[in-house]
């Protein structure tokens, strides 16, 4: 994680950005807490938001979005499956006529079963929610912060990506897509790919579909 923070700082400074960095610690263990404290000491640009209890992926994202202060929010995961230096590509597409710069994976570098399940998931949510973007779950995005003044996210789980992109598309947000590289996970282990988790996600997506599509709840 320390190397990823360093690379992010160097990239932001090379691009001449006005920035700060927020790390959301979603109920980590003591070893991770020590690492985050060391990162805060070494990098004054970094602040850590700590959840005493795990709030899920969606809860972590919502905390990070709420803490943002700059005009644009860039976010990605801390497992180094994306190269933060490719933030430059997102910045090049940002402008007054754009609200969201959305990355999409050139090639997904994961075990075969994850690739297959991921493709099925992406096809299902694109059809069910009418999404027109290439990659719903590519967590490498640059988002205009003011969008969250009118769009409220409620999900605590990973279905927040589907919720977010559905609400943004429905609100008429101007979305630009750009290809980014995807790498094997460098830190941690995914908790999604087991039958219990898949069943839970299916249930959560069903509830989201009822609210956003069947009942047509507002953003």
Image (tube, grey):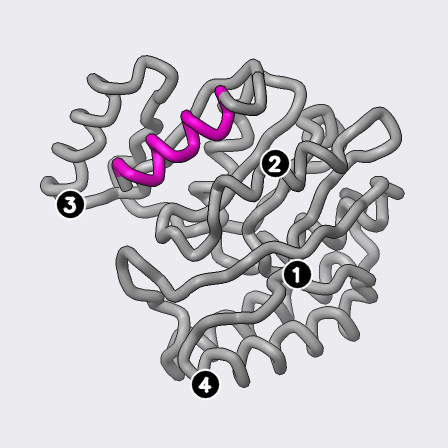
Q: Name the residue under label 2.
A: 88
**Separation of marks 1 and 3 at Cα, in angstroms:** 30 Å
Q: Which residue is at a point 67% across and 26% down the rendered structure image?
A: 145
Q: Tell which circle, 1 or 4, labels the residue nearer the N-terminal end.
A: 4
Q: Is mark 4 on a helix, strand or loop?
A: helix
Residue 121 in the image, given as x and y percentages of width and height: 61, 76
Structural crowding at the residue carrying mark 1, measured as other residues with C-alpha within 10 Å and reported as few (<14), some (14–19) or many (≥20): many
Q: Name the residue under label 4.
A: 112
The rendered magenta stretch, by its main secondary structure, is classed as helix
Q: Is residue 219 magenta?
A: no
Image depth: mark 2 or mark 3 in front: 2
Quarter of the image containing the N terminus? top left
Magenta-tinted stretch: 2-13
Residue 212 in the image, given as x and y percentages of width and height: 76, 57
Image depth: mark 3 or mark 4 in front: 4
Q: What element carries label 3?
A: loop
Residue at the far front in the pictured view: 14
């Amino acid at each position: 994680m320390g190397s990823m923070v360093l690379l992010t700082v160097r990239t932001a400074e090379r691009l001449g950005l006005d920035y700060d960095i927020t790390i959301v610690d979603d109920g980590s263990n003591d070893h991770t807490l020590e690492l985050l404290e060391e990162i805060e000491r070494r990098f004054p640009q970094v602040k850590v938001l700590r959840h005493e209890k795990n709030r899920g992926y969606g809860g972590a994202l919502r905390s990070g979005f709420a803490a943002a202060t700059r005009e644009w929010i860039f976010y990605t995961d801390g497992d180094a499956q994306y190269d933060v230096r490719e933030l430059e590509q997102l910045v090049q597409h940002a402008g007054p006529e754009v609200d969201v710069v959305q990355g999409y994976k050139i090639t997904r570098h994961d075990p075969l079963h994850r690739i297959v399940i991921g493709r099925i998931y992406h096809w299902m949510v694109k059809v069910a929610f009418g999404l027109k973007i290439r990659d719903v779950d590519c967590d490498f995005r640059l988002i205009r912060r003011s969008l969250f003044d009118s769009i409220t996210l409620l999900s605590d789980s990973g279905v927040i990506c589907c919720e977010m992109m559905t609400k943004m598309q429905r609100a008429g947000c101007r979305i630009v897509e750009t290809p980014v590289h995807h790498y094997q996970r460098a830190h941690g282990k995914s908790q999604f790919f087991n039958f219990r988790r898949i069943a839970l996600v299916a249930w959560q997506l069903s509830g989201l579909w009822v609210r956003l599509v069947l009942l047509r709840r507002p953003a």
